[in-house]
């Protein structure tokens, strides 16, 4: 596998080179000190993975990765950001598939690259293509979500503009507002309108709720209502138990959309812990769909792997683990005890069950 690291600080690149030398991976690495230099190198010889710093002169990481996405869409894109660059990094949400904080431990860097490439390989597997062919044409990206995502590409978008887009469909807007209030994304009184909800929970989380609302609208009948309730419950559980393990917005989004794969004809929910060599799970098919719709790589990975978290061969408990537990508890399914033990979090399971039970009782009483 071929990697490219881009950073204007040659000392950082030197440290990364030493890290790669020490790790047991059959990787070939290229190094560039600017986005412009990296693009010239990619013209001659594209790579499998690009890891770029955010803050660079002339062309920052977001601009660079956007060009990589447009010209080499098969390349995995990872962004390195410092603590003071989080706001700027928001501009890269649609172009970076994974984010890493600087300074980054060598083990985390290597594992992130491993997982990103494993996810890419998983979603390109022939068995998923066969399942998609059987299901027929892929559902197009939901209309309202597409409009909202396009608006949010502009970092200067205002709450009134977001509300105007969503409010163009009053029935949808009412359902989105109901969903926003039902998942308890904020403390205090319920939001009274879309603009207020957008300000409280953030534009991107509101866009996710629009997506979930449009996805659930494709179903009808008692099974559809049960699916919606379980999805909302899983999202609420994920938000409560994520603690220091993962970004709250990421796990709530992934749990809310974990069953999106059953959108496709002939796809049913897969049991937990299916063998890695068997047919693709509904989670993997759903992740493929979310990736096609442009959702962030960390969300796609959490959806794809939440039924079989032990396949990651990682002892870190992060978004995948949180979504695994949240969805299992929402459906009354057993969790993967061995996975929790290896991750060192099994002692927290009774408390997480208590959280889930309280939310289930609250949902039943609503």
Image: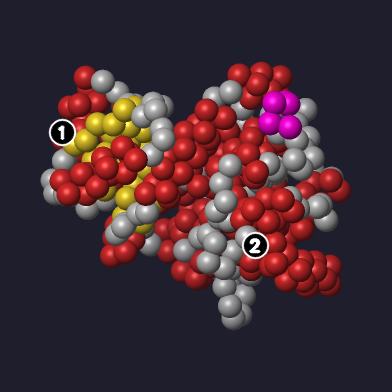
Q: Is residue 276 magenta?
A: yes
Given residues 26 and 5, the one toward you in this image is 26
Given residues 347 and 8, the one toward you in this image is 347
Q: Helix, strand, or loop for circle 2?
A: loop
Query: What's the magenta region?
Result: 275-279
Q: Residue furthest right?
A: 222
- Earlier residue among tags 1 and 2: 1
Label 1: which residue?
37
- Position of 191 compared to 340: left or right? left
Q: Quadrant of the N terminus?
A: top left
Task: For marks 1 and 2, give the one nearer the viewer.
Answer: 2
Q: Residue 17: x percent and y percent?
A: 26, 40
Residue 16 visible in the picture: yes
Label 2: which residue?
345
Q: Rate crowding at label 1 as few (under 14), some (14 to 19) or many (20 or more) other CA atoms within 10 Å.
A: few
Q: Quadrant of the C terminus?
A: bottom right
User: How many marks can you see?
Assistant: 2
Q: Residue 176: x percent and y percent?
A: 62, 58
Q: Helix, strand, or loop for circle 1?
A: helix
User: Which residue is found at the position 24% from the left and 47% from the top?
Assistant: 15
């Amino acid at each position: 596998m071929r990697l490219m690291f881009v950073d204007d600080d040659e000392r950082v690149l030197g440290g990364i080179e030493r890290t790669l030398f020490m790790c047991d991976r059959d990787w070939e690495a290229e190094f560039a000190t600017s986005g412009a230099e990296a693009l010239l190198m990619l013209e001659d010889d594209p790579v499998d993975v690009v890891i770029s710093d955010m803050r660079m002169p002339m062309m920052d990481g977001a601009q660079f990765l956007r060009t990589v996405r447009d010209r080499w869409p098969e390349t995995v894109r990872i962004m390195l950001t410092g603590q003071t660059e989080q706001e700027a990094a928001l501009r890269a949400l649609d172009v970076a598939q994974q984010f890493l904080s600087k300074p980054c431990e060598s083990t985390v860097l290597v594992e992130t690259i491993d997982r990103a490439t494993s996810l890419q390989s998983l979603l390109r597997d022939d068995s998923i293509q066969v399942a998609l062919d059987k299901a027929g044409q892929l559902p197009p990206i939901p209309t309202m979500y597409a409009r909202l995502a396009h608006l949010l590409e502009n970092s200067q978008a205002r709450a009134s503009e977001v509300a105007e887009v969503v409010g163009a469909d009053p029935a949808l807007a009412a359902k989105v507002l109901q969903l926003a209030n039902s998942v308890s994304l904020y403390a205090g009184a319920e939001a009274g309108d879309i603009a207020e909800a957008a300000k409280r929970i953030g534009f991107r989380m509101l866009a996710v709720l629009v997506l979930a609302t449009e996805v659930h609208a494709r179903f009808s009948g008692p099974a559809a209502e049960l699916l919606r309730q379980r999805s909302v419950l899983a999202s609420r559980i994920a938000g409560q138990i994520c603690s220091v393990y993962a970004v709250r917005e990421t796990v709530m989004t992934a749990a809310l959309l974990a069953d999106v794969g059953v959108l496709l004809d002939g796809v049913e929910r897969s049991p937990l812990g299916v063998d890695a060599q068997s047919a693709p799970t509904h989670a993997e098919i759903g992740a493929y769909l979310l990736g096609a719709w442009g959702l962030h790589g960390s969300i796609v990975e959490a959806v794809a792997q939440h039924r079989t978290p032990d396949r990651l061969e990682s002892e870190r408990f992060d978004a995948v683990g949180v979504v695994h537990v949240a969805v299992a508890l929402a459906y009354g399914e057993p969790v993967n005890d061995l996975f929790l033990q290896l991750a060192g979090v099994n002692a927290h399971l009774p408390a997480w069950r208590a959280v889930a039970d309280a939310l289930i009782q609250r949902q039943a009483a609503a």
